[in-house]
Image (spheres, helix red, strand yellow):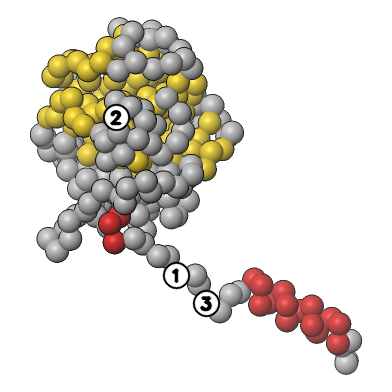
Amino acid sequence: MKLPCRFLSLTVMLVATSYPLHAQKLEVPDWSLPGSATHQQVPPPAGFHRPSRNFATPLGMFEGQSDIGGPLLPGSASYDASTKQYTLNSASYNIWYFRDEFRYAWKKMSGDVSLAADVSFPDPNGYGDRKAVLVIRQDLDDDSKEIMSALHGAGLIHLALRPEKSADMHEAYRLKGEPSAAGEPPIRIGIEKHGDVFTLFIGRNGEPMHQAGTTAKLHFESPFYVGIGFCSHVPDKSDTTVLSHVVLENSAGKVR
């Protein structure tokens, strides 16, 4: 049967639209590549920013989500109500220097805060500086004032802060360690806000949570953002973290 020319033209157009011949190449700036034996990661160019992508999509106890800093590849997140596990996926540059890129599940809060979670990395071969974070931010811009407790893929744990918008991050306390071995309980990290004083908490091998290191001071205007995040530290490769047994209380002294 001979088909009308209009039908043939429409069919060709739909096929061409659904199956592009050439995928768009992802252009990764050299400065954003992770450190290696042959490359040293450096700060972004002065004044460099990307807008965050924000979604009014609740996730478990959190009321919204963001791809902070507009990573080159979109992130994602899911919540399993039966296991109460949060899974965060992200291909992102870093949470450091004067700007960040990471997947963030957040809730607006005021007053004191206690936040804690077990952290695991399903892929044992991910980049060593990838980080799962418990982070409090003033806003959702890539250069927001913030403070975080972070567990790195290689086992480093630290309390770090950006004291003012667009300022460089710095550490208040760091603890070198090893990642959890196969069969061991996940490492648990926590952060407490009591007024303007912030404290890092750690629990290893199922031990009770305890304070680690010295406290840090930082003032936030209310409301601010509180939540969990993940950065793969590789801008063109997605990775995953799983956070479980998450505790979020609107008071101090509840990290457990």
Picture quadrant of residue 151: top left
- Give the Cα distance between marks 3 and 1: 9 Å
Question: Nearest the camera: 235 or 253?
Answer: 235
The reply to whether residue 109 is in sight is no
Closer to the chain start, of discs 2 and 3, is: 3
**Quadrant into which the C terminus falls:** top left
Picture quadrant of residue 5: bottom right
Please tell me whether mark 2 sits on a helix, a strand or a loop.
strand
Name the residue beneath numbered marker 1: 25
- Nearer the observer: mark 2 or 3; the answer is 2
- The residue depicted at 42 percent of the width and 25 percent of the height is 138
Few, some or many residues within 10 Å of mark 2 (<14, 14–19, 20+): many
Q: Amino acid at mark 1?
A: Lys
Image coords of residue 3 (percent x, y): 87, 88
Vertical arrangement, residue 10 with respect to residue 249, above or below: below
**Quadrant into which the N terminus falls:** bottom right
- Give the Cα distance between marks 1 and 2: 33 Å
- The residue depicted at 39 percent of the width and 17 percent of the height is 220
Image mark for residue 162: 2
Vertical arrangement, residue 173 with respect to residue 179, above or below: above
Q: Is residue 86 left or right of residue 133?
A: right
Q: Amino acid at mark 3?
A: His
| Mark 1 touches mark 2? (CB < 8 Å) | no
- Give the Cα distance between marks 2 and 3: 41 Å
Q: Amino acid at mark 2?
A: Arg
Name the residue beneath numbered marker 3: 22
Vertical arrangement, residue 78 with respect to residue 135, above or below: below
Picture quadrant of residue 69: top left
